[in-house]
Amino acid sequence: MSTNDVLFGVLPYMAATLAIFVGVVRWRREPFSVSSLSSQLLESRKLYWGSISFHWGLTIILTLHLLALIIPSGFEWWNGAPVRLYLLEITGLALGLWAAFGITVLIVRRFTSARVRRVTTGMDHVVLLVIAIQIVTGVWIAIGYRWGSYWGTGVFIPYVRSLLFFQPEPEYIDPLPWVLKTHVLSFFAFLAIFPFSRLIHIITLPLQYFFRPWQKVIANREPPADEYISNEPRTKQFN
Amino acid sequence: MRVRAQMSMLFHLDKCIGCHTCSVACKNLWTDRDGAEYMWWNNVETRPGTGYPTGWEDQEHYKGGWQRDKKGRLKLVLHSKGGGVAKAFFNPALPELNDYYDPFTFQYGDLFNSPPSEQQPTAIPISKITGQPLEISSGPNWDDDLGGSDIFAANDPSMEGVDDVVRAQMEEIERVVFNYLPRICNHCLNPSCLAACPSGAIYKREEDGIVLVNEEKCRGWRMCVSGCPYKKVYYNWNTGKSEKCILCFPRMETGQAPACAHSCVGRIRYMGVLLYDADKIASSAALPDDELLDAQLDMILDPHDPQVITAARAAGIDEGWIDSAQRSPIYKFVKVWGMAFPLHPEYRTEAMMFYVPPLSPVMSSIEQNMIKLDIPDERRDFELMDELDKARMPLEYLANLFTVGDSDRIRRVLRIMLAVRTYKRRQSVDGVIDEATLELIEEVGLTENMVEAIYSMTTTPTVDDRFVMPPYHREMSLEAIGDPLTAKGSTGFGTIKPPRRGP
Ligand code: SF4
Ligand code: SF4
């Protein structure tokens, strides 16, 4: 097995297993440890510039990556006309730069605010490093290896699909330049540290908010015998 | 009618001496931890003043509580549900640490390790967060007893609507008029902290109405901090979880009053059960401003009414709780005597902690720097009655705090308190109660029995009069989830894990 096979054929599975398995265990057994660990209370001006750019830039780009994976034909159709291709590429680059600006501010903030330093752990540095590598290589690719949304559908999509269907074909990645390899590898690193770091807050996106009533009342009184189902407190809601 | 019980506290502001014993009792018990040093679940503010955190009543800035929209519907001031999720990355309405203060301690080691020298060594203040030396420039009671009041008192949002003449008078004599406002979480019926929480981590306990944050479910979005108009949810910067007053439920479950109430030196605090109609919560919170207070007080049910008792039993409320509700001092103050109001009912959260407005100091003027009461001694009691508008603590100001600006309601309470005072003075000093006094108490709507009851509940209540604690029967609720004997001798939290910050 070549290095390429290990890095792009085995590593992704190890990272994903870690992410899912440890993530679930942590979520269920240590729910107290799952938090956005916001430091807005301690420093809010720089966070305003950093956090919004970083999070939105990244969220939108990731969504586009995901869309490309789900409906590559849609991208091929869209990129059929050069104008639309330019538009997509420019949007992608702009979003990348936006996120890059965000993470720069966040890194500066981590290192300059004494209050924020107090709540910074070694893992936070790792997280920032991995994401910074991803953003920098991403922007690099957008500039140096242009039209990624066009050629990517022929290289990355089949590769990721091969992974998803458990028939890894790391050969797709082998001939690519190291910048692209780093971009992919850093994603696996991201997956691997996800359950061990504050990154786990990504899956706490509170969508249930939309489906719950405004108020929530929980009874801890002895329920009548026939209502006794589980040891979860019963929930009653109004509004 | 859907009857529910609420544990409620009442603050008799006329008796608060501003000693902060309550705050310290609470701090020692609950918030003496990394990340919680700046939290004052119980704090005592000097009024007029900007309170803690600074300017918490300024809802245009902090966006707490509910509002009524043009169509008469109830909306959070903070956000719609979509807006709340969209603002997860940055919450623009969150107070910053500087709106509270940088928690500090002193470098005590310097006192012991200093080399021999001519001068005494000093312990410099350092930040409890960064450990760095710190110039202390604000604190939880920075404006205590009107310290620096030209900055703080002038910025008090409740001064709005107090007319300019009165305001000028207050400023002229600002050094001689203030009162204290102790505050804890109001354990509201319509809590906006709860409604603002995207994770659904906050809930209200059905059996006693305590509003709690489930720390296992809290994800640190901090919307509750902004959502609470009283700023009584705090974000723990160390654990990344929000925390708030728990009304000492582990104490109450074992029949003890909350620590702040129990330690209160002025004995201003009362605890008791209120029964209320949960069906009316949403509708009464959506009424126009001037109907809010009445609607909220109307929700509180008469625990002696047979219909209410039947409905309470049907709702599964224990006999012991119904009995407690009948003996509740809160019910007497709020409903029977009509002497107490919630703080800022216009926030529409239906706060369930009640306040008897302060009567003294009554009125005076300053002549050549001497404070002088304007009324001859013999006539004083009666004159005061009619001259309450000259009270040194303006009625409008108290009305802005407690009655959505309706100063007549404040006047009525102060007249009751004055009438009780007059009656008892005649009784104990003169030995006879004259006609004029009897007319007076009738005029304010009291009977002689009520006067005695108010007097003894105000002045000479025992611990058991002040704290009428209902039986919690934890053993019964535990039966639902397992063998109660396994929990023998334990209370409150169950298994306790240290609150460690996640990686
Ligand atoms: S006072 Fe307490 S219950 Fe009411 S909104 Fe604030 S935190 Fe919630
Ligand atoms: S302990 Fe009682 S008297 Fe003292 S400040 Fe607190 S509420 Fe007021």
Image (spheres, grey):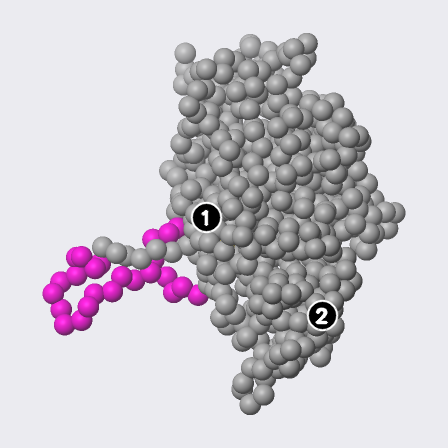
Q: Position of residue A127 (x, y in %)?
A: 45, 36
> Magenta part mainly helix, strand or loop?
loop
Q: Which residue is mark 2?
A: B385
For the residue pair A221 and B123, the one nearer the viewer reads as A221
Residue B170: tell me if it is visible.
yes
Seen as rendered, the residue at the extreme right is B71
Crowding around mark 1 (Cα neighbors within 10 Å: few <14, some 14 to 19, many 20+) is some
Dot label at residue B35: none
Quarter of the image holding residue B105? bottom left
Q: Is residue A11 left or right of residue B354?
A: left
Which quadrant does the N terminus of chain B fall into? Answer: top right
**Which residue type carries mark 2?**
Met
Name the foreground residue: A199 vs B145.
B145
Q: Residue at x 68, y 43 (%)?
A: B331
Magenta range is B110-137
Q: Residues within 10 Å of mark 2 (few under 14, many from 20)?
A: some
